[in-house]
């Protein structure tokens, strides 16, 4: 009998509810002294595109990690402005618009009936999808459902798709459990 398959360890956090929010998460613990840059170089950018993008044939392209980080910050600023009911800066608007205008991955059905995505430059094409998703999010009613994680050290954004709209954590499996454990420890210490 073969051994059970090892669970796949994902390098980047996903599950924020939108690809643009997952992309913004690549600056983990934003705004805190513990901030962690998850896209420090081209290798990390390729890893993110491989994990989070639709293309299977990811290879180095024209985009650099610096360009990706600049797009990430422009997306973050666009989302923050939309949440606050303010106009985004011309710089952020231009950066996201330019990225969204690039060719996106193209779907095709292979002879086996499986869907595959192709792009001449999979990195730029995936970043185009991220930018398009950000533009869609900031111009839709869903922007009112974007939340900041209530985790004390997290600061991640997520889309609250719960029916009552009262979700507090980006992930119950990480931040939610941590907060509940802290509450239990506080109660135990008080007793």
Image (spheres, rainbow, N blue to C red):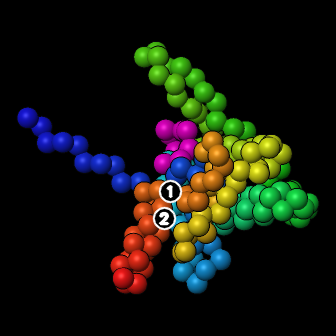
- Report if the CB atoms under discs 2 and 1 are less than 8 Å apart: yes
Point out the image quarter for the N terminus: top left
The label number, if any, that marks residue 54 in the structure image: none
The residue where tag 1 is placed is 171
> In x, y percent, where is residue 91?
87, 64
Front residue of 186/115: it is: 186
Residue 48, magenta (yes or no): no
Which class describes the residues within 10 Å of circle 2: few (<14), some (14-19), or many (20+)? some
> In x, y percent, where is residue 95?
81, 57
Q: Is residue 117 above or below residue 28?
A: above
Q: How many marks?
A: 2
Q: Is residue 20 above or below residue 4?
A: below
Q: Is residue 76 above or below residue 31?
A: above
Image point 53% across, 49% down: which residue? Answer: 15
Front residue of 126/166: it is: 166
> In x, y percent, where is residue 12?
48, 58
Front residue of 11/125: it is: 11
Which region shows up in magenta? 51-62
Secondary structure under tag 2 reads: helix
Q: Is residue 34 above or below residue 103?
A: below
> In x, y percent, where is residue 62?
66, 53
The residue where tag 2 is placed is 175
In the image, 98: left or right of 133?
right
Point out the image quarter for the C terminus: bottom left
The chief SS type of the magenta part is loop
Would you say residue 134 is visible in this rendering? no
Q: Residue furthest front?
A: 191
Image point 61% across, 80% down: which residue? Answer: 32
Cα–Cα gap, marks 2 and 1: 6 Å
Image point 41% across, 77% down: which residue? Answer: 187
Would you say residue 109 is visible in this rendering? yes
Residue 56, magenta (yes or no): yes
């Amino acid at each position: 009998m073969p051994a059970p398959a090892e669970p796949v360890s994902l390098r980047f956090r996903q599950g924020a509810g939108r690809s643009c929010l997952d992309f913004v998460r690549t600056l983990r613990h934003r705004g805190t002294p513990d901030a962690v840059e998850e896209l420090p170089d081209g290798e990390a950018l390729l890893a993110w595109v491989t994990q989070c993008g639709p293309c299977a044939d990811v290879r180095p392209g024209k985009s650099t990690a610096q360009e990706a980080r600049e797009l990430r910050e422009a997306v973050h600023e666009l989302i923050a402005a939309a949440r606050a009911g303010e106009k985004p800066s011309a710089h952020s608007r231009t950066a996201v618009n330019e990225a969204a205008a690039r060719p996106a991955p193209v779907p095709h059905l292979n002879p086996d009936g499986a869907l595959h995505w192709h792009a001449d430059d999979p990195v730029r094409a995936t970043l185009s999808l991220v930018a398009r998703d950000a533009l869609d999010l900031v111009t839709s009613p869903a922007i009112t459902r974007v939340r900041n994680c209530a985790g004390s050290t997290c600061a991640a954004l997520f889309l609250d798709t719960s029916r009552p709209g009262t979700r507090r954590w980006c992930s119950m499996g990480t931040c939610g459990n941590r907060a509940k454990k802290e509450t239990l420890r506080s109660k135990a210490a008080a007793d």
